Image (cartoon, rainbow, N blue to C red):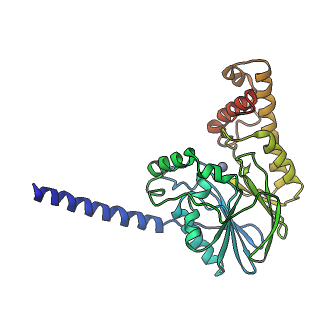
Amino acid sequence: MPNTMNFFRFLLAISCTFCISAYSQESKNITLTPKQISSSVWYVEGLTALGSAENKNFISNAAFIVGPDGIVVIDALGSPALAEALISAIGKISPKRINSVIVTHYHADHIYGLQAFQKIGAKIIAHPAAKEYLNSETATQRLSASRVELSPWVDDDTKLIEANSWVSNEVKLNLSGIDLIVKPVGPAHTPEDLVIFFPQDKVLFAGDLLFRGRLPFIGGTADTEPWIQALNSFLDFKATVAIPGHGSVSENATADIELLRDYLTYLRKMMGKAVEELELFDEAYAAIDWRKYENIPMFKFANRMNAYNTYLRLLNPKR
Ligand SMILES: [Zn+2]
């Protein structure tokens, strides 16, 4: 019996060693190729898909600005391995240090990579409303579920990382010699939404307030009224380029901002009418003309949920 036990232990050790080496081998094989979109700005574009082990949770965008005294990164991608791949891709473009990471919001696909940036000494900047999420049961449960669903990319070593400094009002920051405007616009997509404007290159980093080339997800915590206001306020920046949280870069920022604003306005109008007329959601949804939006990617996955969450919020604005 002891021999059998030892044999099992031996098999376990072999298979664990194999797992670890297979994982590290695989993680090293992630290559991200940033696209340059202005003289100082690059970004990587996540896939238009739901997060999965197969796509390594690479479903969100991250961007970076190379400044005179270092590099500022916006968002940290959906796993430590992806963030390491981004750090390595940045290293091929510039030898400068990554000094700061600004988090547009604390959704898993934007933050599970933070620990890789913390490890290299980058300072993390976010909105203080994220603290509520970080200390919530939802965040803990989400991470536990992700450790299973996104294994091996998210595992027991993946941690939720707090910011080093918190920005709660619109501020002008100079980071690594880069002048930026950091503007809180939540609660909209999330309570802790931040957008970042880089006046030198007229680039707006819009986080998940702007989805381009696909419909957004309007989660249970999203509030479309301030979201619409936020999109209107983006127009004041007069950005020529906007990098969304998901989807390709917008080189016609005004038109893309207006398209999303009009979609959210339409959802509110249609769902508002349904609530006012005491219609059941299913009946109201089936009767609405969605033709203007049904060919936009993710319509099938997102639109019904978006409409439902808007309906619930309008039914009970305090939820
Ligand atoms: Zn998000």
Query: Hey, which quadrant is residue 217 in on the image?
Result: top right
Query: Looking at the image, is 28 positioned above or below residue 132?
Result: below
Which residue shows up at 36% across the image and 67% down it? Answer: 21
Q: Nearer the viewer, residue 299 or 314?
A: 314
**Nearer-the-camera pick, 163 or 253:** 163
The location of residue 215, given as percent across then percent down, is 70, 43
Q: Is residue 164 left or right of residue 255?
A: left
All told, the count of numbered labels is 0
Q: Please provide percent x and percent y for residue 312.
A: 70, 29
Of the 4 image quadrants, the one containing the C terminus is: top right
Residue displayed at 68% across by 23% down: 281
Task: Please tell me which residue is depicted at 58% across the width and 47% down the height of the picture.
Answer: 136
Q: Is residue 243 visible?
A: yes
Q: Residue at x 66, y 80 (%)?
A: 96
Q: Is residue 246 left or right of residue 148?
A: right
Quadrant where the image shows the N terminus: bottom left
Position in image of residue 180 (x %, y %): 80, 67
Instruction: Give the vertical position of 172 relative to 255 (above or below).
Output: below
Q: Is residue 247 visible?
A: no
- Where in the figure is residue 298, as x and y percent of width and height? 64, 42
Residue 167 in which image quadrant: bottom right
